[in-house]
Image (cartoon, rainbow, N blue to C red):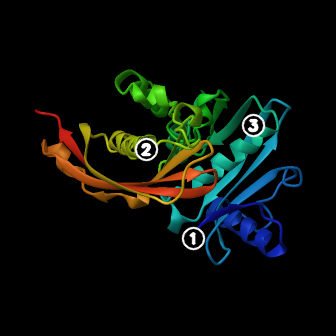
């Protein structure tokens, strides 16, 4: 189990700074203590910890001006890279920056991490001279808009939202919108007042539709991640309703629930996969959906 926390105890700070030194300073033979700077005392710090409380990803936000936040000292333990913890840190730090009035955030990145930040919606505004200095850093910037609150692939999510409204009109009628995508989780919400029954709760059919589309959306984005193409069709779906939805509904699909193999699409063959989603009434899960999907390969 992993969670994002703000370090507060001496043990947490030790774990936090040790990971920063281990990843960002030890490879360059820098001593302990060199991983800290004068902005640590005024910065906002976040860390992903495992069940033992050990830091496995860290990052810091500080302000260069009232309008500009800067994310620095991003680091993930090498043995945990590729698990989405860096995205979780950027997400939490961006939320702090927005809440404190930042108009944009800047990040300095070397070549080896440039692609990660671009996937998180950052744009290169100043390129480092990596010909003369392979360790030169590029400066990236994200100017905050309503839509790029989505932390991972925000432009893809905007495309998906438009596709839904143009090709699946019920999404507009129900007020379904994309809330967040992290690469491993996909969250949507709907407007309760557009989906309400005589009991003042959400129609069961609307719950089913929201759950189905949330799985569909995650699968659509995963196809793009893997550079695969195909038409997504729901083959079978089962849902368990536990309690009525009386608050603004939201749905969450996790990549960890994904089973199946999409690789057959590259050979022009259909693929079958299973995904699950949960519907929440506020913070409480009240329905669970399991969908079996067929991805129809494009004819060569």
82 is higher (above) or lower (below) than 95:
below
Indicate which disc residue 98 carries.
Answer: 3
- Looking at the rendering, which quadrant does residue 3 occupy? bottom right
83 is higher (above) or lower (below) than 233:
below
Q: Determine which residue is flagged by label 1.
A: 1
161 relative position to 76: left or right:
left
In this orientation, which residue lies closer to the viewer: 207 or 300?
A: 207
Residue at x-position 64% and y-position 46%: 91
295 relative position to 19: left or right:
left
Give how far across and how far down residue 65 sits, in percent.
Answer: 85, 32
- Looking at the rendering, which quadrant does residue 247 occupy? top right
In this orientation, which residue lies closer to the viewer: 142 or 189?
A: 189
Residue at x-position 83% and y-position 66%: 8
Q: Nearer the viewer, mark 2 or mark 3?
A: 2
Q: Determine which residue is flagged by label 2.
A: 214
Give how far across and how far down residue 127 sits, in percent.
Answer: 59, 30
From this viewpoint, is residue 129 visible?
Answer: no
Disc 1 crowd, CA 10 A, few/some/many (<14, 14-19, 20+): few
Give how far across and how far down residue 221 sits, in percent.
Answer: 39, 41
Report, in whole angstroms, how far the alpha carbon at label 2 lies from the one at label 3: 26 Å
Which element carries disc 2, helix, strand or loop?
Answer: helix
In this orientation, which residue lies closer to the viewer: 53 or 285?
A: 285
Which element carries disc 3, helix, strand or loop?
Answer: helix
Report, in whole angstroms, how far the alpha carbon at label 2 lies from the one at label 1: 23 Å
The mark that comes first in sequence, 2 or 3, is: 3
The mark that comes first in sequence, 3 or 1, is: 1
Which element carries disc 1, helix, strand or loop?
Answer: loop
């Amino acid at each position: 189990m992993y969670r994002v926390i703000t370090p507060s105890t001496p043990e947490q700070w030790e774990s936090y700074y040790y990971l920063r030194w281990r990843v960002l300073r030890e490879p360059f033979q820098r001593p302990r203590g060199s991983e800290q700077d004068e902005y640590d005392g005024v910065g906002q710090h976040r860390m992903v910890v495992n069940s033992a409380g050990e830091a496995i990803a860290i990052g810091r936000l500080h302000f260069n001006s009232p309008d500009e936040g800067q994310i620095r000292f991003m680091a993930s333990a090498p043995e945990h890279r590729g698990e989405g913890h860096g995205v979780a840190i950027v997400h939490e730090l961006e939320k702090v920056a927005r809440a404190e009035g930042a108009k944009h955030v800047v990040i300095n990145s070397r070549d080896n991490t440039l692609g990660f930040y671009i996937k998180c919606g950052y744009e290169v505004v100043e390129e480092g001279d990596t010909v003369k200095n392979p360790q030169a850093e590029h400066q990236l910037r994200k100017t905050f808009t309503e839509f790029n609150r989505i932390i991972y692939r925000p432009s893809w999510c905007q495309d998906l939202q438009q596709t839904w409204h143009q090709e699946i009109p019920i999404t507009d009628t129900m007020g379904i919108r994309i809330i967040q995508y992290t690469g491993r989780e996909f969250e949507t919400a709907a407007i309760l007042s557009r989906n309400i029954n005589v009991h003042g709760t959400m129609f069961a059919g609307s719950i089913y539709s929201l759950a189905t589309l949330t799985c569909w959306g995650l699968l659509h984005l995963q196809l793009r991640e893997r550079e695969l193409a195909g038409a997504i069709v729901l083959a079978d779906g089962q849902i368990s309703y536990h309690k009525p939805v009386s608050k603004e509904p939201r749905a969450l699909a996790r990549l960890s629930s994904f089973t199946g193999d999409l690789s057959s699409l590259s050979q022009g063959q259909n693929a079958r996969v299973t995904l699950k989603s949960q519907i929440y009434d506020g913070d409480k899960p009240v329905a669970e959906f399991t969908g079996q999907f067929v991805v129809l390969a494009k004819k060569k």
